[in-house]
Amino acid sequence: MGIPAAFRWLSNKYPKIISPVMEEQPVKMDDGTVIPVDTTGPNPNGEEFDNLYLDMNGIVHPCSHPEDRPAPKNEEEMMLEIFKYTDRVVNMVRPRKLLMIAVDGVAPRAKMNQQRSRRFRSAQEAQEKEVDKQELLKLLKQQNGGVLPKDTLESAAKKAFDSNSITPGTPFMDILAISLRYWCAYKLNSDPAWARMKILISDATVPGEGEHKIMDFIRSQRASPDHDPNTRHVIYGLDADLIMLGLATHEPHFRVLREDVFFQESKTRMCKLCGQAGHEARDCRGEAKAKDDEEDKQAKEAPLKPFIWLHVSIFRETTCPSWMAMSPKTAISI
C-alpha cells in the first residue's frame, strides 16, 4: 500500500539519496541480428548486488495499461510484456545469489475494505465508459445511414483489459503463476547469469502483500546463523512504503529500484501512433499512419524509461536520528 507523493517529496527534499541507474543495451547489427547483453560480466554501476526482490504487482499493472504504447491485446501478449520487463530489471541489477518474485496475495483485513471500494469504483467507471461507447456507436450509425465504418467496427470490438482481474483468486493470477514458473525454468536452463542464482516465487496463493512477504523473508534470513550482514539487497517496486520498509530492516546495504518519475514530466505528451501532441498512445482514437519504411517505424518506438536508485542507507544517515540509525540491539540497550 503506497504513500501518495511520498517518493516525489523525499527525492526533492533530499536529492542525494537518488542516483541514475547505468544500464547496458543490446547491440543491433546492420543485418538485423541483435547481440544480447552479457549479464555474466561486471555490473556497469560499479557495484555487485547479491539479492533482488521483485514486487510483481509493480510490473503487472504498468504492463496491463502502458503509458507509451497500446495495451496488450490478450493475455499472451501481456505475459510476454511482463517477461520482457522482468528480464530488463534482472539484467539491470544482475543479482548473484537470489531472485525473489513476490505477487500480492490476499490482503490483510485492515486493507480489504479500502481495496474493495477501489475496485468497485473502477468497475463502475468501466461500465459507464462502455455505456458512453455504445451511445457514440449508435449516433455514428445513425449519421452513416445505419452502417458503421470498418475501422470503427474494429475499434469497437476491442475490449480493454480489466485491471480488476489482477486480484488473488482470479484465473488470470493462476495463469500468471504458471507462466512465471515456466519462464524462470527456461531462464535457468538457457541464461548463464541465472545458473548460480536461487529463484523464489511467492504467488497469489500465499497471503499477504508482495512487499510484506519480501520483508518477512529478509527478517527470516537475518535469523539464520550463516547470514552475511554485508549482503547487498535491491528491491523493485512502485510503492513509496518500500522506503520505510527498507529502513525497518536495518540492513546496511539496501537500495530501492524504480522508474524515474521525473522523466515523464520532462517529456511533452506526444502520441506514438498518430504523431499528434496533446494525448498519449493509450488514449489515441485515430488511426496509425501507415509507413512502410522500417526506419520510420523504429523512430516511432518509445525510448526506454530510465531507472533510478534510492539509497536507503544514505537516507537513513541524512534524515533519521542517531538512535534510529543504530542496530536494533544497540537501540534497545540504550
Image (tube, helix red, strand yellow):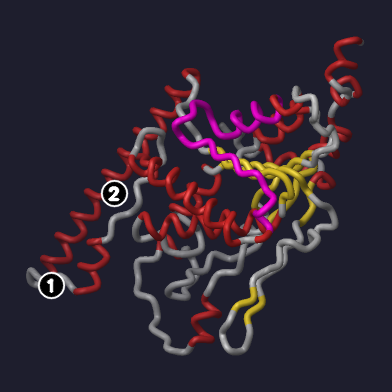
What residue is drawn where x is 47% and y is 64%? Answer: 69
Judging depth in this view, the residue of 43 and 273 nearest the camera is: 43
Which quarter of the rendering shows the N terminus?
top right
Left or right of 45: which side holds 35? Answer: left
Instruction: List x then y, in percent, for residue 121.
Output: 36, 35
* 224 versus 312 height, above or below: above
**SS category of the residue bearing label 1:** loop
| Quarter-of-image position of residue 74 | bottom left
Does residue 206 lie above or below 90 as drawn? above
Find residue 161 and report its horizontal and vertical position in percent.
35, 51
Left or right of 326, for residue 291: left
Identify the residue shown where x is 37% and y is 40%.
164
| Magenta-drawn segment | 193-219
The answer to which image quadrant residue 114 occupies is top left
Q: Secondary structure at mark 2?
A: helix
Q: Does the segment drawn in magenta span residue 160?
A: no
The residue pinned by badge 1 equals 144
In the rendering, which numbered label is found on residue 298?
Answer: none
Please report whichever mark, 1 or 2, sits nearer to the chain's N-terminal start.
2
At a point 63% along the width and 80% down the height, the residue shown is 28
Picture coordinates of residue 24, whole percent (x, y): 72, 67
Kind of residue at disc 2: Lys
- Residue located 66% across and 49% down the image: 258
* Dot in front, 1 or 2: 2
**Callout 1, which amino acid?**
Asn
Relative placement, left or right, of 138 versus 235 is left
Q: Which residue is mark 2?
A: 129
